[in-house]
Image (cartoon, rainbow, N blue to C red):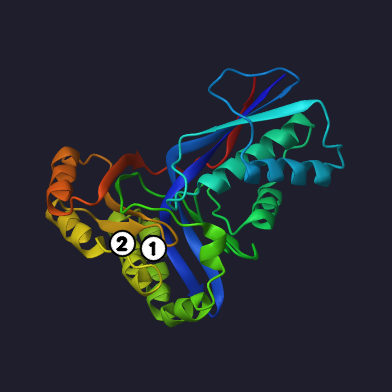
Amino acid sequence: MAYFVRAPGTCGEFIQGSIDGHPFLVTCPINRYSYAISKVAQPFPHMFCSLQPKAALARKRVLDLLRVPVVSGHSVYTRSEIPQGKGMASSSADIGATAMATGLAHGHRLTLDELATICLSIEPSDASFYPGIVQFDYIHGTMANPLGHCPPLKIIIFDEGGSVDTLTFNARADLRTLIAEKEELIKEALHLFKEGIAMHDISLIGQAATISSFANQRILPKQSLYTLHEIGDQFHSVGTIIAHSGTIIGLLFPIDFSGEEACIAEVKATVPHVRYLDTVETTNEGITFMKR
């Protein structure tokens, strides 16, 4: 018997900051995934590979939780379609999928809180394994507030290049002070976002994401943010989203937006150093699994 698990990545975060000193992010899960398969002592097709170090550590944490010897006869294999080092929750998705596959292989379905604890024991983490949209304490895990389901959005993602290591970024000595300085803007963004979710109003959601994106420029500036935002306006984007600790910038559109090719061409002509990365859609499914 095998268990097939998939966990979504993200397009950065709708919002990231703190309120009253408590850090949090608002998830933006997308239809790009990490996959894990667990099976007894039998290799899988070549598309699957042995675990990355963080995923391997997640497997060990689950075995420790279940008090199962590391040499247990069950192998876990992973595959991911999420770019690494860009702020798209590739590590969180790998860790979450691997942890769940390991637990299922030993007769235990991990709770979402258990998944969060395992992820945060390895690194500051996203929470895209929760269904819907979540306001999540990505450092301590003391907050995991469901905000509801996101209306469908199309996101055109661009990359400024390079990569950001999550652990190194969150260890910055000045980070706490800089995050505190933007609290009033983050409060405004969160208010707009909650209203947008409640009313299924993507324009309010886009405004919230844009406020948080612009507020992050003192922490991890993106050279092309304002230019891409202006191009988005030309094509009637509802807002701009970023990876607050990554390299990507996304333009948010209604799900039926049909001007994708023209928008990408305009970005390439205006800011040629920026690379088109992908076009994705938001998802509300969280982590999923099946027996095989």
Badge 2 marks a residue whose secondary structure is helix
Decide which of 69, 29 is in the foreground and name it. 69
Q: Is residue 190 above or below residue 48?
A: below
Residue receiving disc 2: 204
Badge 1 marks a residue whose secondary structure is helix
User: Can see residue 164?
Assistant: yes
Residue at 70% from the left image edge and 45% from the top image edge: 57
Residue at 65% from the left image edge and 57% from the top image edge: 120
Residue 44's x, y, as percent? 63, 19
Q: How many marks?
A: 2
Residue 142's x, y, as percent? 65, 65
> In which quarter of the view is residue 286 placed?
top right
Decide which of 125, 256 is in the foreground and name it. 125
**Mark toward the start of the polypeptide (1 vs 2):** 1
Residue 189's x, y, as percent? 38, 69
Q: Is residue 32 above or below residue 121?
A: above
Residue 93's x, y, as percent? 55, 43
Residue at 45% from the left image edge and 79% from the top image edge: 178
Rendered image: mark on residue 193: 1
Q: Are marks 1 and 2 in contact (CB under 8 Å)?
A: yes
- Quadrant location, the N terminus: top right
User: Can see residue 129?
Assistant: no
**Mark 2 closeness class: few <14, some 14–19, many ≥20 residues within 10 Å:** many
Amino acid type for the residue under numbered disc 1:
Phe
Amino acid type for the residue under numbered disc 2:
Leu
Q: CA distance from mark 1 to mark 2?
A: 6 Å
Decide which of 58, 202 is in the foreground and name it. 58
